[in-house]
Every structure is written in structure tokens, then in C-alpha cells.
Image (cartoon, rainbow, N blue to C red):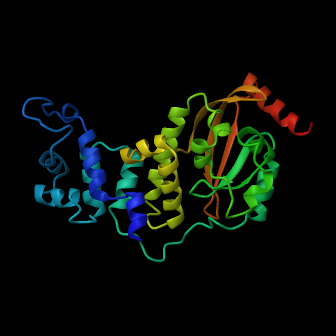
Amino acid sequence: MREVEQIMNANLGSYLRQMRERAQPENRGLPSSGARRVPGLRREEVAALAGVSQTYYTRLEQSHTAHASPQVLLSIARALELNSDEQDYLLKIGSPEQPGQPRPMQDGQLGLSARMLLSSLDSVAAAVLNYRCDIVGWNPLFHALFAPHLDFGLTDDAERRPNIIKLNFLDENVRSLYADWRTESESNVAYLRFISGDHRNDPRLAELIGELVIHSSEFGALWPRQDVANCVEGTKLFHHPVVGELDLMYQSAQLPDGNILKFYHAEPDSPHEASLRLLRMDLGS
């Protein structure tokens, strides 16, 4: 269990320290030069802005106190000007995990209703992921967009399922799809950091992170930054080897079983929708 915690690095003190060093004193009406020897805010400044004692805040940052009340954590989040995802993550790692908390069905087979849903979404590239981003199921268009070099039925095997983040870092076929792979890689790592707050003791998540740290120098450089983001919607530009440039919007939706439906679609009547339609037609050839 200790090894899992070290890989996850979901540590309250470490996160507070990194966020404090990132903070800009001038944004809080404080001088940014002069006697400052370290970047960001001083501990006493964060404590004053949050309305807690310097001694108490120091104990939190030095991990002498592992948890704090939600009210205190929210006050510190405001002092550090955390965004909503960073605040959510701070609340998770700053609170004890609740025993008996229901867990998503992350390693089972795709349910019949979800499988039917994927089949019906033939005009968009759609997949069902668990919170670790293992691909539990995909429709033919998602498969053709991301990983036609992999066997379509691979998602049915819980031990061999492709993981979209691992593919993005370690599979050159997938990695080369992204016009802006650097931004994609940063988003992937920020999402893994975000979910690690909820799943601090998940050995399979720790195994995934450990494998990526070992086999990808880029991941190894990004993980310690502790960037946090829950990536649920946006746009991505792909360079697909069959249909060329694809500018696609993506969205994510939580399913009743705890898994995530993720789908990619193009702007209606755009050249990118025509390219996506061409890729769909290519499936039948």
C-alpha cells in the first residue's frame, strides 16, 4: 500500500506547497520583489489570506496533519486562487477516504444497454471508458479513428484492454494522430492526477502511472508538476492517415455503471464532418 501511495503522490502537503510556489504575490496585492527568496507566496501569507494560523497551515504543508475540514480547505483554495478542478482535487486529497464507498464497475464486461448505445451512435466516434481510461468498448468509427491497427475485440478482455492514455504516450500510431501532441499529453496527465484524488489506493491505477513513468520520459517530467484538470469537453485536431485533417469536438458523459461515454463529432456541414463520414464509409469497403 505504501508503494501505491508513493506512485500516486496524492499528498496534501506536497500539493499545497506546489500550489503556493505557483501563486503570484502581485495578484493578492503583495510585493513580488524585495526580500523574497522563494517563488510564490510565503506560508504566513497563505495562512493570513485563508484565515488560519501559520502554525496550522505549516503542519498541513509539512504533512504533520494529513487532513483538514472542508471549510479550511476551501479557504486555502481561495487564498491560492485554485480553479474548480484544482479545488475539487484539494478537497479529495485533504479528506480521509470514506470506507465502503461504492466503486465503478471498472473491470467488468460492457453491459448490454451500453453496447446497444455504442452501436446506435454510428455517426460519431464513441467509446466507453472506465475512470482509468481503459477502453471497455468502442464503436467501429472510434476504432477506425484511433486504433485500427489493434484488434477490435481487444476491449472485451479485461486484462488486455487498450488504455487511451497509454496509447497516447507509448503507441506511435496513436501519438502521431494529434496535431498538438504536447497539449494532449499535458491534458492526459492532468486528468490522471485529477482522478487519483478519488482513487488513491487503486493498485491498477498506480501500476498504470508507474508504467508510464518508467517508459515515457515525457510523462515522467509532467507527473510531478501536479497539474489537475477534469477533461470533459473540448476540441482536438487530428491528422488521420486515411482521411487527413479532422477537427473534432469531444464530450464525456457519466453512465449509471460509473463508466464514461466519450464521443467525438464534427461541426455539421463542415469539411471535417464530410471526412468523418468518409471514414465511416471506408469501414464498409
Q: Classify the position of the N terminus by image quarter.
A: bottom left
Q: Position of residue 63 (x, y in %)?
A: 23, 62
Q: Residue furthest bottom?
A: 100
Query: Splitting the image into 4 quarters, where does residue 277 fall?
Result: top right
Q: Measuring 15% from the left and 48% from the top, which residue is drawn there?
A: 43
- Nearest the viewer among 282 and 241 is 241
Q: Position of residue 109 (x, y in %)?
A: 72, 66
- Nearest the viewer among 31 and 268 is 31
Question: From where the camera sits, is residue 229 visible?
Answer: no
Q: Is residue 204 above or below residue 241?
A: below
Q: Is residue 266 above or below residue 128?
A: above
Q: Position of residue 265 (x, y in %)?
A: 70, 36
Q: Residue furthest top?
A: 271
Q: Measuring 48% from the left and 61% from the top, which residue is drawn there?
A: 206
Q: Measuring 79% from the left and 39% from the top, which residue is drawn there?
A: 123
Q: Residue furthest right?
A: 285
163 displayed left or right of 156: left
